[in-house]
Image (tube, helix red, strand yellow):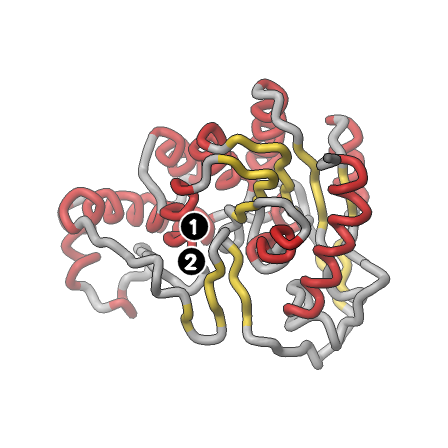
Amino acid sequence: MILIILWGDVGPPAFQKNLSYKNNTDVHLNSRVKEIKEFKNVDILFLGSSRSYRHYDPRIFAKRGYSSFNLGSNSQTFLQTEVLVKRHLRNLNLRLVVIDIYPGMFNSDGVESSLDIISNDQLDNQTFKMVLLQKNIKVFNTFIYSWYRNQFHKASIEIEKRKKGYDTYISGGYVEKILTYSHSISSDTINFNIKNYQLDSFLNIIEYFKQNKTKFIIVQSPRHKRMAYKDESKLDSIFKLENVEYHNYSYFPGLDDTLHFYDSKHLNQNGVKIFDEFLIDNVLQYKYLMP
């Protein structure tokens, strides 16, 4: 453990293959976990991967009278969603949780997202359980080094540092990218298999919501129309079996691949505006957040 800590402090980054401390990166999880402490009454909490914190703009929801917070994180899978839900949900007086999903969340090992959470959020029993479950040396080493940083460095990252490169952090957890367009469009079919521990975490989250009488829905936000996952219908079976509300907008008809995306998986700001307003008018306001 001492060697891991020393290597984290003085070792050249190029040789830190099995240690990845990601504090204060341009995905802004550090900003979110600091800012969420200031939010007490929230109509909508968004959870999920970058498709969450780049697809749900709190400014659009605020204009329609709804407060919101986005607790998405980079490459978030259900392992990390479970940790974040059990850590932060009780502090918010919520009306609705929206979990943004895509098939890869069931297939991923979740290592990248675990490194993000370990480096930027508190370390507690939920984090330690996640580390033990993953059995990954990089996750384990980063957990040790992050504990050391929290104990002895007390590094504070200022939330005011909102603009990094092409991205700007918006209060409420959203990250706005400078307007760009997706010009390369090619057909792509991705194979995926459901990992048991990801499915277990998903079921734990659902059970936690039900026990706490928290209203929630599952949403798959838009992606390129030529991008597909093989056997994606397996997800429909899971959601139907668990009797959860699932809204699949992966192939949203009101969007153009070249005009409303900046890559095959992420909407640009023009696409975000169209999708968020549709979601408010046709799903949230109509059924879940009625006055």
According to the picture, the residue beneath numbered tag 2 turns out to be 28
Q: Callout 1, which amino acid?
A: Arg
* Residue contact at pointers 1 and 2, CB within 8 angstroms: yes
The residue depicted at 71 percent of the width and 37 percent of the height is 289
Above or below residue 16? Residue 67 is above
In the rendered image, residue 143, in percent from the top left (x then y), is placed at 30, 44
Q: Residues within 10 Å of mark 1 (few under 14, many from 20)?
A: many
Q: Amino acid at mark 2?
A: His
Q: Which residue is mark 1?
A: 32
Q: Which residue is located at x 70 percent, y 55 percent?
A: 276
Q: Residue furthest right?
A: 253
What crowding class fits label 2: few (fewer than 14 Cα within 10 Å), some (14-19), or many (20 or more)? many
* SS at circle 1: helix
In this rendering, the answer to whether 223 lies above or below 108 is below
> From where the camera sits, is residue 155 visible?
yes
Task: Give how far apart the Cα atoms at labels 1 and 2 are.
Answer: 6 Å
Which residue sits at x=24%, y=48%? Answer: 145
Task: Identify the image quadrant of residue 189.
Answer: bottom right
Q: Whole-percent x and y of residue 57?
A: 60, 57
Q: Secondary structure at mark 2?
A: loop
Q: Residue at x 79, y 34 (%)?
A: 237
